[in-house]
């Protein structure tokens, strides 16, 4: 711990998921003073999200894979001197004097406590995870349509289901995990609708061979779906939701190889909820605001460019987990530990255990190769925009339709997401384009445009710098300069764990 309240921490870790926990306990174990900030009341992040103790869940581990890995990390955290700061919504990271960082946050369960906190540290580890990528379709604003990850979060944190009869749709391996979880929890899941297929994995035999446990995991999910009589429909998509007050049914349509709906193949499936998601997008706003270099991943999203020890292009700023490209919890654990080792070596000159370092890097590189194969196998193809009608809302915050965006492109000459944003307000609402950015960029690129190589597909808006990573009350911004600028937020909320 810092010697006094005014001393900076050696390392501020932002995000208490797998990567952040691994980085924090590794660094603390090597003698660094560490502050661990997270918006949630409990550690675990999205993957190890679990019910609050007040709910009284008898076996929270029943909804998780690899719970033992999280339990081990949590024990290490409890035994360490890491200062866990739950309920801290980090909205910016700044460098104050070239050698010291300031992490700015607002506190409270949802950030509405409106109390500003500033944590100073000599180095920073970003482990902020990812958020879901959503592609709009007619009816996706009807109550009962939830994100696939959101449905799983409802189940893990609140032990509730979004409906009784739930269709799971979109693209990516998360769908199988969500569907099996919902079915095991008692929901009726009539079908999993996957826009891609699984044959794409066959083009990456070395990545598959290096990860037999992934095949086992897929088999476990497959067995659960068979046991609960859940149909798996590949090369298909939900192209319309029926209902007004609540989801009543969905139309599922077959897709061609470019994700264009095949006419005459639509069929209706009755349900009262739809859990839908089209992969994950790295959450890198804090890093891009600092000018960190980014790279385009194989599914078109932006991730941070990192060196062999997880450092970003900005010295003293490391990143781990989904910020470097979506890859899952095992990859996040390896990257978090690597970053913790690197920070300790930089600050305290701890000799790096070369054997451990090589093992971690080999594991990371193998899992990163598999993640790349997974991403390219489920990457959205350009033809998905064909299932949009002109009335389909693309930007839900500002109620901007696909027709309005198309008119901006064809009639006003907009050819990029930024120009569309200026002309239509798409992406200017509460979420600041996190929900509609992909769709807006695709429509701005032109639906008839030739499809570029996968790594350069225009499925994401250009790298955008958001000065505020989360919504911040103006009162909190105004109060910030008057807050004590010491290393420790002395009146931080109590640890929720």
Image (tube, grey):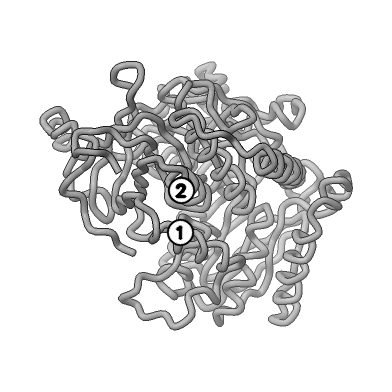
Q: Which residue is mark 1?
A: 76
Q: Is residue 403 visible?
A: no
Q: Quadrant of the C terminus?
A: bottom left
For residue 116, side relative to residue 73 (left or right): left
Compare residues 373 and 341 and report the one nearer the observer.
341
Q: Is residue 346 visible?
A: yes
Seen from the viewer's position, the closer of residues 211 and 226 is 211
Q: Position of residue 180 (x, y in %)?
A: 64, 72
Q: Nearer the viewer, mark 2 or mark 1?
A: 2
Q: Position of residue 464 (x, y in %)?
A: 47, 25
The residue tagged 2 is 29
Q: Earlier in the sequence, mark 2 or mark 1?
A: 2
What is the spatial separation of the Cα atoms under label 2 and label 1, in whole angstroms? 9 Å
Task: Decide: few, some or many residues near mark 1? Use Cα within 10 Å; few <14, some 14-19, many ≥20.
Answer: some
Residue at coordinates 39% horizontally, 28% vertically from top-left?
466
**The N terminus appears in which quarter of the rendering?**
top left
Mark 2 touching mark 1, by CB under 8 A?
yes
């Amino acid at each position: 711990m810092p010697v006094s309240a005014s001393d900076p921490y050696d390392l501020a870790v932002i995000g208490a998921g797998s990567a952040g926990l691994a980085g924090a306990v590794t660094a603390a174990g090597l003698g660094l003073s560490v502050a661990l900030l997270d918006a949630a009341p409990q550690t675990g992040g999205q993957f190890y999200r679990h019910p609050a103790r007040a709910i009284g869940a008898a076996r929270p581990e029943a909804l998780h894979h690899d719970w033992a890995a999280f339990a081990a990390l949590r024990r290490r955290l409890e035994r360490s001197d890491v200062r866990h700061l739950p309920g801290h919504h980090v909205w910016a990271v700044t460098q104050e004097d070239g050698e010291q960082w300031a992490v700015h946050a607002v506190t409270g369960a949802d950030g509405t406590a409106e109390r500003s906190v500033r944590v100073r540290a000599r180095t920073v580890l970003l482990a902020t995870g990812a958020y879901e990528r959503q592609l709009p379709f007619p009816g996706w604003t009807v109550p009962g349509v939830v994100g696939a990850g959101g449905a799983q979060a409802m189940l893990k944190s609140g032990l509730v289901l979004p409906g009784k009869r739930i269709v799971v749709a979109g693209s990516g391996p998360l769908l199988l995990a969500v569907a099996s979880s919902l079915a095991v929890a008692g929901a009726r899941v009539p079908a999993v609708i996957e826009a891609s297929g699984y044959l794409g994995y066959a083009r990456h035999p070395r990545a598959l061979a290096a990860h037999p446990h992934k095949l086992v995991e897929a088999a476990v999910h497959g067995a659960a779906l068979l046991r609960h009589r859940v149909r798996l429909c590949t090369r298909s998509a939900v192209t319309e939701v029926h209902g007004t007050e609540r989801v009543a049914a969905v139309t599922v349509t077959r897709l061609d190889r470019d994700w264009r709906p095949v006419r005459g193949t639509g069929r209706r499936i009755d349900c009262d909820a739809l859990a839908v998601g089209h992969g994950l997008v790295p959450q890198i706003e804090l890093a891009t605001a600092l000018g960190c270099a980014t790279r385009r991943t194989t599914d078109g999203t932006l991730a941070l460019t990192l060196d062999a020890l997880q450092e970003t292009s900005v010295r003293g700023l490391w990143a781990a987990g989904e910020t470097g490209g979506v890859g899952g919890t095992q990859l996040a654990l390896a990257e978090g530990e690597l970053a913790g080792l690197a920070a300790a070596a930089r600050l305290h000159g701890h000799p790096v255990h070369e054997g451990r370092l090589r093992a971690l890097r080999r594991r990371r590189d193998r899992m990163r190769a598999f993640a790349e194969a997974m991403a390219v196998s489920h990457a959205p193809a350009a033809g998905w925009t064909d299932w949009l009608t002109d009335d389909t809302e693309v930007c839900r915050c500002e109620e901007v339709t696909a027709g309005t965006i198309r008119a901006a492109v064809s009639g006003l000459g907009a050819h990029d997401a930024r120009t569309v944003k200026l002309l239509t307000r798409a992406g200017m609402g509460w979420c600041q384009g996190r929900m509609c950015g992909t769709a807006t960029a695709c429509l701005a690129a032109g639906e008839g445009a030739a499809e570029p190589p996968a790594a350069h597909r225009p499925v994401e808006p250009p790298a955008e710098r958001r000065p505020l990573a989360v919504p911040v009350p103006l009162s909190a911004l105004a109060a910030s300069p008057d807050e004590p600028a010491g290393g420790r937020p002395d009146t931080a909320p109590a640890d929720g764990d």
